Amino acid sequence: MAAYRRVAISEQNDNAGSGNRARLSSGDETTSSPAATVRSQSERISDKLHALAWVLAAYAIASYTRLFHTIFTDDRIIRPILHLSIMIFAVNVVLTLYLTVFLPFKFPVTPTHKTPASSPEFWGVYCPRVIPIMTACGVVGSFLLVRACYPVWGFLTPFILGVVALGMFFSLHFIPWC
């Protein structure tokens, strides 16, 4: 198991070099090697297989329960709550596009802006409330979606929607990075 090292909060703290920090990181040989962040091929294959298992489980559950057909056509679904949940998730999509598309376009990396605008460090300074708002929207939207679908599947609703959500998240493993 790889040893963890302390990371300075800012470059100034790291450059100031307190003796305690230097002592903590001096015995760690993985801190200076760039190969420490490179993962082995077996680890990457294992990750892809786990992702594939979640995607297949989500597909099986969505097919067996006829999830999308049920959500869009079943009369037992509580429509106002479902629509509110969809609107909250749309807010999350818009905020994600704001962080990942608009900010890098507006603030390209220049001598003035050295931190990439698509990094969490930049977001924490320029728009510190966006991530907490997205978290709150995700939690509230998830609870509302479960409540809207509860009359159809009962106590299995959180498990069905949770597995399908995890399958959607893990499907991102199969999008190639250009």
Image (cartoon, helix red, strand yellow):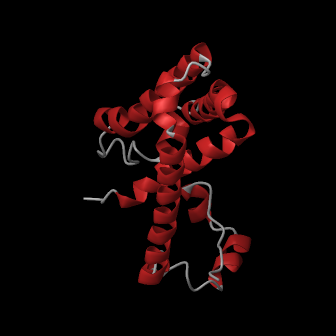
Q: Nearer the viewer, residue 5 or 86?
A: 86
How far from the left and from the top, in percent, is residue 18? 69, 68
The answer to whether 158 appears left or right of 68 in the picture is right
Which image quadrant for residue 131? top right
In this view, 101 is above or below 5: above
Residue 120 at least partly seen: no
Give above or below for 27 relative to 125.
Answer: below
Is residue 170 or residue 99 the one in the foreground? 170
Q: Tell me the residue at 63%/29% (across/down).
A: 149
| Quarter of the N terminus within the rendering | bottom right
Quadrant of the rendered image containing residue 146: top right
Residue 89 drawn at (x, y percent): 51, 28
Eyeballing the image, is 44 above or below 125? Answer: below
Res 55 seen here:
yes
Q: Report the number of discs.
A: 0
**Measuring 36% from the left and 60% from the top, which residue is drawn there?**
174
Q: Is residue 174 left or right of residue 58?
A: left
Q: Residue at x 56, y 64 (%)?
A: 15
Name the residue at the left extreme.
178
Screen quadrant of the C terminus: bottom left
Q: Residue at x 47, y 34 (%)?
A: 68
Most foreground residue, 79 or 113: 79
Query: What is the residue that sits farthest to the top in this orientation?
Result: 80
Task: Judge from the rendering whether residue 111 lies leftward or rightward of residue 54; answer left or right.
Answer: left
Q: Position of residue 56 (x, y in %)?
A: 47, 59
Rendering coords of residue 42 (x, y %)? 46, 83
